[in-house]
Amino acid sequence: QVQLVESGGGLVQAGGSLRLSCLASGSIFAIDPMGWFRQAPGKQRDLVATITSGGTTNYADSVKGRFTISRDNAKNTVYLQMNGLKSEDTIVYYCYARIYSGYAWKDYWGQGTQVTVSS
């Protein structure tokens, strides 16, 4: 059973920083890519950033220059360093990973972590 467990959300003042972490555990042969999405109630889940096993990154325009995604392949962990947070970054963030467990590639999601930016 594969699981994604997120940590690091919380309350921060505008202009501040937070670091999200997501650990993938279970029967894992390969993970590609890993990333972060975010979703407001009643809205679609939107891309924040993704990173391949080789380190290629992709960011939403709204977070470029403020957020940095990274991963530790040995630990099956992806991180999202969020700097210069704005009130519009207040939302639930979801970890994402496409994982090969030995028989098929499958998409997995974390449970979500709330980030609240106060002005």
Image: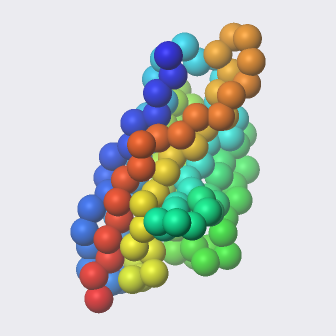
Q: Is residue 82 visible?
A: no
Q: Is residue 114 visible?
A: yes
**The one of 1 and 99 positioned closer to us in this rendering:** 1
Give the farthest residue toward the top: 102
Q: In the figure, is residue 51 to the left or right of 81?
A: right
Residue 19 to residue 76: above or below: below
Q: Residue at x 45, y 81 (%)?
A: 88
Instruction: Estimate the x, y position of residue 15 in percent, counting from the top left.
Output: 35, 83
Q: In the figure, is residue 117 to the left or right of 69?
A: left
Give the farthest residue toward the bottom: 119
Q: Quadrant of the C terminus?
A: bottom left
Residue 2 to residue 52: above or below: above
Q: Residue at x 69, y 55 (%)?
A: 57
Residue 62 to residue 67: above or below: below
Instruction: Estimate the x, y position of residue 3 in percent, counting from the top left.
Output: 46, 27
Give the farthest residue toward the front: 42
Q: Tell me how many marks there are.
A: 0
**The one of 62 and 88 positioned closer to us in this rendering:** 88
Q: Residue at x 68, y 21 (%)?
A: 100
**Way the structure is coloured:** rainbow
**The one of 40 and 93 positioned closer to us in this rendering:** 40
Picture quadrant of residue 59: bottom right
Residue 108 to residue 115: above or below: above
Q: In the figure, is residue 56 to the left or right of 91?
A: right
Instruction: Estimate the x, y position of residue 25 in percent, counting from the top left.
Output: 46, 23
Q: Residue at x 73, y 11 (%)?
A: 103
